[in-house]
Image: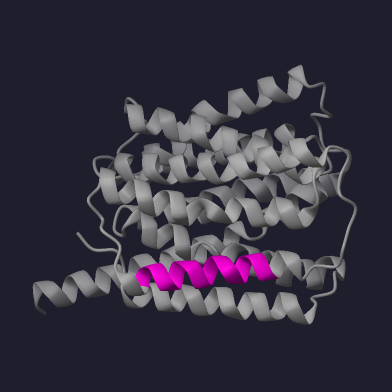
Amino acid sequence: MTAMALRRDDSRLALAALVFGALVIGMSPILVRLAACGPAAAGFWRLGFATPLLVLMATASPRAGGIGTPSRAMLLAGLWFALDLGCWHYGIRYTSVANATVLPNLTPVIVTLVSWFAFRERPRAVFLVGMATAIAGAVLMAEGAKPGPPGPAPHIGDILSASTAIWYALYFIAVRSARLARPTVSVMLWSCLVGAPLLLITALLLHEQILPASALGWAAAVGLGLAHVFGQGSIAWALGRLPASTASVTVLVQPVAAAVLAYFIFGETLTPLQALGGAVALGGIVIAQQAPAGR
C-alpha cells in the first residue's frame, strides 16, 4: 500500500471518528435537560464524571501518555471549553431556543479563519461552499422550530449564545494545537481538570441547584460524562489527523442528531423546514469533505 493510500485511509478513519463523536455529542442537550440542575452545574457534572474514566484510560496504557504535565494549549482548551459550556447553557435559559441554536453555529467560520493563519490550512473554494451550505442548513433547522417563548432576558441570552461560537472555536484551535504533540487522552483529561472546577465555582457563585433532583437526573449526569469521553474524545482524536476547519464543519451534524433524538425522546415535532434544514446541513458537510482545507 502506498503512502498516499495510507494517508487517505487514515483520513477516512478520522472522519468516521469525527462523525461518530458529533453524533454522540448530539445527545448532550437531551441529557442536560434530563439532568435537571443548574446550567453551569450540568457542565461540571459532564466534566466531573468524565475525569475518573479519563484518568483510568491515561494510566492503564503506556500509549495513552499518562497524566503528564499540561501544555499551554491543553490548559487553554479547558478554559475555553468551560466558557463554551457555561455560556451555551445559560444562553438556552435566557433567550429563545432558535437563537441559542443558530448563533453557536458560526464556529466553523471562526475556526476556518484562525486555522488559515495559525496552521496555514488554506480553505479551498468547494470547502467554503460546503461550509456555507452546512451553516445555512443549521439556521434553517433553528428557524423551522415551532415558535417558543423569547426567554426572560433575550439580549443577554443572544450575547451568551454568540460568544459560544467564539469559545468553541478557540477550544477547537487549542485542541488541534495540543494534539500536534500530545495524545488524545492526555489532552481530554487536562481540559476536564481545568474546566470542571471553573464550572463548579460558577455554579456556586450563581447559587445554582448543584445536585440533580432525581435518579433519572443522576443517570443523565453520568451519561453526560460518558458522552464527553467518547464523543468529544473522538473529535479530539480526529483533530490530530484532520484540519480544524474540516472538523468544525463536520460537527454541525450535532443539531441534526439532537433534533432527531428530541423527536423520539420528548415527542418534539420535527417540522418540514427543520427536516429540510437537516438535509441541507448534511449535504453541506458532504460537499465540504470533497475538498478539505489544504496547506
Whether residue 56 is visible, yes or no, is: no
For the point 53% across and 37% down, the residue is 81
In the rendered view, tell whether residue 149 sits above or below residue 64.
below
Q: For residue 183: magenta?
A: no
Start-end of magenta stretch: 127-140
Q: Quadrant of the C terminus?
A: bottom left
The image position of residue 20, as x and y in percent, is 50, 66
Q: Residue at x 68, y 38 (%)?
A: 159
- Front residue of 93 and 3: 93
Horizontal side of 234 relative to 103 (left or right) equals left
Q: Quadrant of residue 2?
A: bottom left
Q: Quadrant of the N terminus?
A: bottom left
Residue 191 at what x, y percent from top left? Answer: 47, 34
Examine the structure image and report whether residue 136 is included in the region drawn in magenta. yes
- Dominant secondary structure (helix, strand or loop) of the stretch shown in magenta: helix
Q: Residue at x 13, y 74 (%)?
A: 4
Q: In front here: 50 or 146?
A: 146
Q: Quadrant of residue 3?
A: bottom left
Quarter assignment of residue 218 = top right
Q: Quick check: 273 left or right of 251?
A: right
Q: Is residue 185 above or below residue 21?
A: above
Residue most toward the top?
A: 205
